[in-house]
Amino acid sequence: MPQTQSRPRLIQAMVDAFSLPDLRMKLIFTFAMLVVFRFIAHVPIPGVDLVALQQIFERNQLLGMLDLFSGGAMRNFSVAAMGVYPYITASIIMQLLVPVIPALRRLSEEGESGRNRINSITHWLTIPLAALQGYAQLQLLRGQGGVIQVGALETLAIVISLTAGTMLCVWLGELITERGIGNGVSIIIFGGIIAGLPSQVGRGFIAKDDWVGVAAFALLALVTIILIVIFTEGHRRIPVQYARTAFRGGKMYRQAGSTYIPLRVNMAGMIPLIFAMSLMIFPGTIASYFAAPPGQEGNFANAIMEWFSPSTALPIGLFYWGAYFLLVVGFTFFYTMVIFEQMDLARTLQRQSGFIPGVRPGKPTTDYLNSVINRLTWGGALFLSVVAIMPFFAREITNASMLTLSSTGLLIVVGVALDTMKQIEAQLTMRRYEGFLK
């Protein structure tokens, strides 16, 4: 049983967590896997000009933001340069294909065995996606002068190394899920982002940015984190009642129970930001292969790169951020509808003899839930869109040019931290300890 607390709640919860042998081993194992991941992130690929890479990432804000997600692995072009993002891409593709392809839909309805089969397909899909992304990343850095020109055999070896690094990171994430605490793949991404923050903040101070701008940047980041916490945890409770039949003494009795369905305001999570960012990056990436080199007169490809670059100054920069804002709104509605349709809450309630008070089962329940989720999604879509364009406000307000306020990175960090805290909270509550949250 827990002792009377004389320490702050957070510190006491951590002490209680480490006092339990099984939970302590889970936390230590999770930390050990993150250390292994950081070692892997420093294993370089041969044929890389590190000095040229440093210069490329310093002058390219977009590459700097992608490097933040990898925890510096992309800046060093290590075997873990892509992290687990090809696996995330494969998972998103599978989520979108499940309701479309009948065979996958049937697998999803087969319970644990079906989910394991879909997970296996996702792993196999990750391999070609990682190879394609690795080759594209190699060509991008080679075009910028950061990778020494190599032949076909060396290129194949680099692509295989990057693919193997991705699969190794995915394996570490799944070990964390199985033996550690939290969602392993998310924690791997979390570790990469957190590892890259100190060096980024350090570069911001060293770059002679004014202290007022850096302080304003920190305040804006704090406000963004608070908004993310509020909207991530925000949900609407839909009351549900259940009518169950019980037999006692040879007689049939009706038993009633009540609960609620928590519909989140931000049901789509960070996925709309990834979709929108990928779509905005694509034209500029393609144009970079046809653009005139520095010092020569720019062509149409240079103009495309300027229009689709987040670092472009006003007024052209308004096109990028305005289009980004609208794409996030559209993808939020699209992805939320896909996820909500897969949940099929109306049919689940009907099978479990549940109903929403004042709403008839069947199609009326479906229409009611769709109307509620549509209204909630407006709040989630506008929230994600505002968070998405926060880097623009950070740059214009603070003028801290060497610091990058990554909206997606903040969403990942806050979301993973909340999810991990809830899992530790559940472990402590089961043992009658008080956790982090009230």
Image: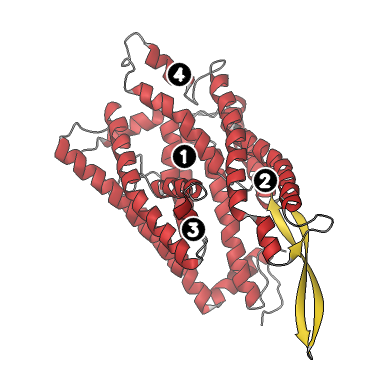
Label 1: few (<14), some (14–19) or many (≥20) C-alpha neighbours in 10 Å: some
Residue 55, horizontal then vertical, whole percent = 34, 29
SS state under label 4: helix
Question: Is residue 334 found left or right of 230 in the rendered image?
Answer: left
Quadrant of res 346:
bottom right
Of the numbered discs in the image, which one, if any, rests on residue 106? 3
Mark 4 or 3, nearer chain start: 3
Q: In which quarter of the image is residue 436?
A: bottom right
User: Hey, what amino acid is under mark 4?
Assistant: Glu
Q: Name the residue under label 4.
A: 306
Eye-nearest disc, 3 or 1: 3
Amino acid identity at mark 1:
Gln
Task: Name the secondary structure under disc 2.
Answer: helix
Q: Name the residue under label 1.
A: 200
Describe the element under mark 3 as helix, strand or loop.
helix
Q: Is mark 1 on a helix, strand or loop?
A: helix
**Is residue 211 among what the camera can see?**
no
Task: Give the label, 1 or 4, closer to the camera.
Answer: 4
The amino acid at mark 2 is Ile
**How many other residues sit within 10 Å of disc 3, few (<14), some (14-19) or many (≥20)?**
few
User: Closest to the observer: 82 or 421?
Assistant: 82
Q: Check the image and report above or below for 315 versus 103.
A: above
